[in-house]
Amino acid sequence: MMNTTVKKVHNYSAGPCILPKEVFEKAAAAVLDLDGSGLSILEISHRSKAFEEIMAKAQALVKELLGAPDHYQVVFLGGGASLGFHLVPVNYLREGGKAAYANTGEWAGRAVKEARSHGTVDVVASSEDRNFNYIPKGFTIPNDADYFHFTSNNTIFGTQYKAFPKSPVPVICDMSSDIFSRQVDPSEFALIYAGAQKNMGPAGATMYLMDPEKLGHTGRKISPILDLKNHAAKDSMYNTPPVYAVYVSMLNLEWLKANGGVRGAEERNAAKAHALYEAIDRLPLFTGTTEMEDRSTMNPTFVLKDASLEPAFDALWKEAGISGIRGHRSVGGYRASMYNALPLESVMVLVEVMEEFSKKNG
Amino acid sequence: MMNTTVKKVHNYSAGPCILPKEVFEKAAAAVLDLDGSGLSILEISHRSKAFEEIMAKAQALVKELLGAPDHYQVVFLGGGASLGFHLVPVNYLREGGKAAYANTGEWAGRAVKEARSHGTVDVVASSEDRNFNYIPKGFTIPNDADYFHFTSNNTIFGTQYKAFPKSPVPVICDMSSDIFSRQVDPSEFALIYAGAQKNMGPAGATMYLMDPEKLGHTGRKISPILDLKNHAAKDSMYNTPPVYAVYVSMLNLEWLKANGGVRGAEERNAAKAHALYEAIDRLPLFTGTTEMEDRSTMNPTFVLKDASLEPAFDALWKEAGISGIRGHRSVGGYRASMYNALPLESVMVLVEVMEEFSKKNG
């Protein structure tokens, strides 16, 4: 591999985000030469045997790692989960029908906005009244909705569903920011979709895991490029797929499989979340910004009780090689995104910085 | 850089396709460490200063290399040019309006199909009557169309507009397969769009170069994710862009600028096309499949007059390290895609193989 002498960075970026070092190494090597073919992964045809195998492997790994039913189908499309917000009503909302949505943050709100271009949206639950610092519970999903849509983890606000809502209608979930971080049962969902750039791979691909039996019932005329049934029938090759993003996702899912699968990730993520939240609760200068029971294991958010100390704290974590923990502009404070590939070691560095800061300013 | 001992491949892939070696080397290095930052290009935030500079540079290079008017805007989106086929009518076709299209091949036809989901499409010219082996000329574009759409180069059939149609209405062009290969005047176009995976970069990004004054006149309510005005206003950051595809495109456009710009590419492409077409016309075993005057410099297509000789010819070019010249299933025969980064040396290898084959079988 290349020889590089670079400083150690603890990358807490909210996404695109850290991936395992081995994945970066294989991903870099393939840009020069894919598996001894003499060709770069960037210059091979998406119709080549080599890429067909990569796509098939990525699709199979998604199903295997999540434990999806055999008949479920996986496609990888470009355009981001934001395009997914659009594809959901186009593919699942009947002409004149109604969709139920839970609004728990920025991206959940954007999903509502896109759906409203296509029909009636019933926002059956919202945590907007307290700047999205909790997950609504005990709400009712109407029987006559075409589907219920929610966002399993809210990257910006740092909240996460610990139990999924029970629904009398098909459930669709945007799992962009916590897919592969904990065990779920895909058979409970008509569609799970996720932008790759957190726990799956680099930015540029969005994965759709779907129950094909739940598709094609809207009575709408759907443009081919927006039709999930079409993409599934063409096995993600209706048009040129985002080749490299799919390739790196495949490498990363291989890594996950070799490292304990989703169960292993879940255990590591629980340990990291425990370490950081324990420090937030123990150290009097800090306080978490969300309801305790809804705390995200992926994106812990916290503030300094005395905001005037922020410059001193910022200097300290920057010196320690920590990157990317300033909170989103709509929340302020701090957000320490801890996706699958962030090592516990990086979390311990942050905890030590928080302790050192507390000693100096306590 | 990494040490690799790989056989020399002459990559004629129709796209994704060959890019310059220096681009692959920089693109691989950045996957391990972006410019000494200690972070991979795959793990940095799209909101980081580093990526904002990459995006700005890519946008500026598109305008500089093509000579676009100052007020034109550039965005990079995921989803492929096929999503572009959908965005065109959504953003330019008035409710109840009419669009004019020229149908010159597979992708032009798909663009027509997507537009028909949104209103009336007037196919003002077509070469379908002779399996798309020529470019229609002398057709009339109606004054009352909202826009005229055409495909400048037809990858599958090997035809290319040598002069662009004169139009009384705004012109929109899918330049996916010949952008940056020859000089054009962007001020003649309301919108030029192109999938990255030929002359721009890897698969995964689509570039839209647009006159902002021609946007926003349809009276339609446009979903934010499909609204080109929205993406331009947010400078390609409305949602997470395809970071790596934009980065590699930027590297490739830097390479093009340092190597004579579009004028330099045009000269090299003319020399390559001349060399191959001269051989096709000179050697009696071969014949071109398109009208001479409409021959593509990017995707020359040809057949063996005696198809029973194909296995012998195939064995010969494979032995020479040539890859990817079998024609598309809808045409058969051969297609030698010769994008910007394919060296003249690779063309000469193919010509020599054709000559050797002719001697043996002539």
Image (cartoon, coloured by chain):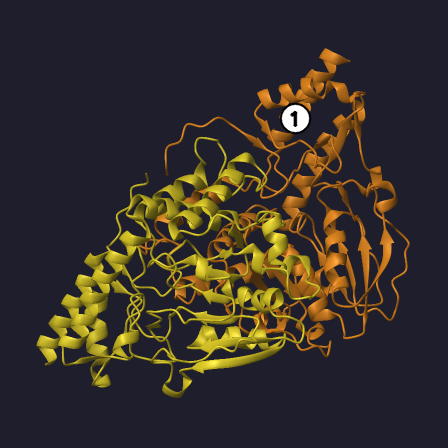
Chain colours: A orange, B yellow
Residue B267 appears in which quarter of the rendering?
bottom left
Examine the rendering and report whether any part of residue B9 can be seen: no
- The quadrant of the picture occupied by the C terminus of chain A is top right
* Along the viewing direction, whichever of A7 and A120 lies nearer the viewer: A120
Which residue is at 48% across, 55% downward?
Answer: A247
Q: Is residue A124 left or right of residue B230?
A: right
Judge whether B22 appears above or below B50 on screen.
below
> Residue A151: percent from the left, percent from the top?
74, 53
Amino acid residing under circle 1: Leu
Examine the rendering and report whether any part of residue B125 can be seen: yes
Residue B79 appears in which quarter of the rendering?
bottom right
Label 1: chain letter: A
* Along the viewing direction, whichever of B288 and A108 lies nearer the viewer: B288
Q: Is residue B85 left or right of residue A51?
A: right
Q: Residues within 10 Å of mark 1 (few under 14, many from 20)?
A: many
> Residue B312: percent from the left, percent from the top?
19, 77
> Residue B129: percent from the left, percent from the top?
40, 88
* Along the viewing direction, whichever of A164 and B91 lies nearer the viewer: B91
Which residue is at 57% across, 42% downward?
Answer: B46
Of all residues shown, which one is farthest toward the bottom?
B129
* Along the viewing direction, whichever of B325 and A298 lies nearer the viewer: B325
Judge whether A245 appears above or below B120 on screen.
above
Judge whether B23 appears above or below B143 on screen.
above
Which residue is at 33% across, 80% downward?
Answer: B332
Judge whether B85 appears above or below A20 on screen.
below
> Residue B170: percent from the left, percent from the top?
51, 66
Q: Is residue B102 left or right of residue A312?
A: left
Q: Which residue is mark 1?
A: A350
Secondary structure of residue under mark 1: helix
